[in-house]
Image: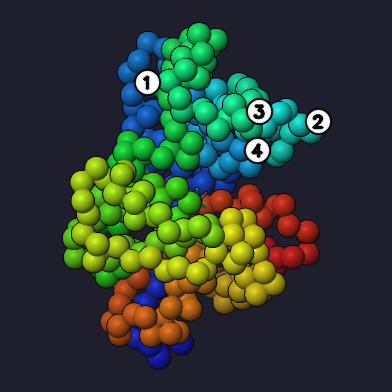
Amino acid sequence: MLLQKQVSVSVLRLDTINPVVSGNKLFKLHYFLEDCMASDHKTLLTFGGAWSNHLVATAYAGSITGIRTIGIIRGERPATLSTTLLQCLEFGMQLKFVSRSVYTHKSTPEFVESLSKEVGPFTLVPEGGFDAKGARGAALIMNLITGIDHTHICTACGTATTLAGLMMGSPKNKTIIGVSVLKGDSDIEERVNALMGTGYDQLQLQMLTGYHFGGYAKKTDQLIAFMNQCWKQYQLPLDFVYTAKMFYAIMESIRLNHFLPGSKIICLHTGGLQGNRSLPVDTLLY
Ligand SMILES: *Cc1c(COP(=O)(O)O)cnc(C)c1O
């Protein structure tokens, strides 16, 4: 099909940077880590749910830099911890569980103040790295593809921090494509605007919508079949939460003639593969 449509697709494998930690998460942490290393407290505090890739990435980054990490976890402590949280503990992160209602107010000055009374001073990383600093870190991903000829770059979007980073770091003549993995994906442009701090060129950003397969972390048999097909055909391991939806959206859009002949698309494989471990063992070929 790609030959017939005269469109090329390449995949930037950020997943191979680290087997546990999602590639894009480390980039988003870059400038927070830099600030934290320069501080006296050398403590990083952040937030997430029990399956948060962002939490593991923060814990891992702490373990290799010697920075103390604290994770504020949404919901009461369960009897058995998720593999994600166990991994955080292995990387030396201190976990603090708070009720969902407290968690909702996690960004208020009062709550942050109460945390620093409890654990001392820290560098705060918003959930998912959703911050201009996180986006500037994600912009560093562009350094990996300097000199590679392309017309489009594509990423899966959760908080849209990675997407905003690509917008910041990319030459203006390249189109940036976002595929939202959330059902309510209508505020992505607003988020990008907030993260970039300046107006952006709306023509440069394209969203492929309607590829959430039911919502965040939802999946269908069709999506699973597509993942197995990509493995057979390209030896490309995708995860069902993010990258499978992104890649499906790209392939389907090519099929529907969304891209002009001659388009050269780079898709970011942002990682997240450990999420597949929550599937029954014989679901995937990999
Ligand atoms: C977190 C994550 C994303 C989404 O990144 P955002 O910057 O929050 O949009 C995409 N892919 C994978 C594998 C992730 O873990």
Residue 77 x/y as whole percent: 73, 28
Q: Which mark is residue 230?
A: none
In the rendered picture of this protein, how many numbered marks are placed on residues? 4
Q: Which mark is residue 50?
A: 4
**Residue under label 2:** 79
Foreground residue among 121 and 68: 121
Disc on the earlier residue, 3 or 4: 4
* Occupied quadrant, residue 264: bottom left
Q: CA distance from mark 1 to mark 2?
A: 35 Å
Residue pictured at 39% horizontal, 61% vertical? 178
Residues at circles 4 and 2 in contact by the CB criterion of under 8 Å: no
Residue 59, above or below 43? below
Quarter of the image for the C terminus: give it.
Answer: bottom right
Residue pictured at 71% horizontal, 28% vertical? 76
**Residue under label 3:** 99
Residue 169 x/y as whole percent: 25, 51
Disc on the earlier residue, 4 or 2: 4
Residue 41 is at least partly visible in this image: yes
Disc on the earlier residue, 2 or 3: 2
Q: CA distance from mark 3 to mark 4?
A: 13 Å
Foreground residue among 1 and 220: 220
> What's the amino acid at mark 1?
Met
Find numbered disc 4 in the image and state the secondary structure of the residue it sits on.
loop
Residue 236 x/y as whole percent: 55, 66
